[in-house]
Image: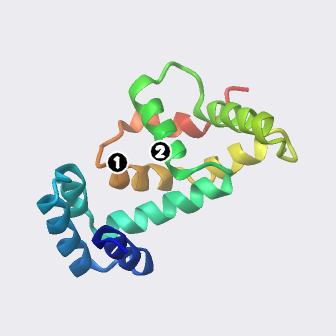
């Protein structure tokens, strides 16, 4: 096992092990992984709690957490008048076509799950992405255009 694998194994076992994370960030920097070291140094228990919440949220709508975060970023940066829930339904529909899995109600379940999470989603999104989202953009991500 490489030193990197050993650090990552310990952190998978206890994501809240701040001491190991500090040593790991030093090791990353010493081995030329400056960006990753900087990211590790920005880690906080609140960030981890929010990332855990986002991961659970993404699982509820059958989506990798990175994809859910990217959809949130896209919404914040490129809001084009399309309602977010419809966008999530569209993404789910595409995934259904890829995997053959279906939502019982054509994606309305995903919309309902997501709309029930507002504004908690945005609180965790802001912590995980270290950004601030304009309040005017938050609510419409979870509304339906119908």
Residue 132 coordinates in the image, percent (x, y) = 30, 43
Secondary structure state at the residue bearing disc 2? helix
| Residue with the most extreme right position | 104
For the residues labelled 2 and 1, the Cα–Cα distance comes to 8 Å
Mark on residue 69? 2
Q: Tell me, yes or no, whether the two marked residues, 2 and 1, touch with CB atoms within 8 Å.
A: yes
Residue at figure coordinates x 20%, y 53% from the top left: 33
Mark on residue 58? none
Left or right of 96, for residue 75: left
Residue wearing tag 1: 129
Of labels 2 and 1, earlier in sequence is 2
State the residue in front, 62 or 83.
Answer: 62
In the rendered view, would you say 126 is above or below 92?
below
Residue at figure coordinates x 50%, y 63% from the top left: 53
State the residue in front, 127 or 40.
Answer: 40
In the rendered view, would you say 6 is above or below 50?
below
Residue 58 coordinates in the image, percent (x, y) = 59, 53
Residue 10 coordinates in the image, percent (x, y) = 37, 79
> Pointer 1: residues within 10 angstroms few (<14), some, or many (20+)?
some
Left or right of 137, for residue 64: right
């Amino acid at each position: 096992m490489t030193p990197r694998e050993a650090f990552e194994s310990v952190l998978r076992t206890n994501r809240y092990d701040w001491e190991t994370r500090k040593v790991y960030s030093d090791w990353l920097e010493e081995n030329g992984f400056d960006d990753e070291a900087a990211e590790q140094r920005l880690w906080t228990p609140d960030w981890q709690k929010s990332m855990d919440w986002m991961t659970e949220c993404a699982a509820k709508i059958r989506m990798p957490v990175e994809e859910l975060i990217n959809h949130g970023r896209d919404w914040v940066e490129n809001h084009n008048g399309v309602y977010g829930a419809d966008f999530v339904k569209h993404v789910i529909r595409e995934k259904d076509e890829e995997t053959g899995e279906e939502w019982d109600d054509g994606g309305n379940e995903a919309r309902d799950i997501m709309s029930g999470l507002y504004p908690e989603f945005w609180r965790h999104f802001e912590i995980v992405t270290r950004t601030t989202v304009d309040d005017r953009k938050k609510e419409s991500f979870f509304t339906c255009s119908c």
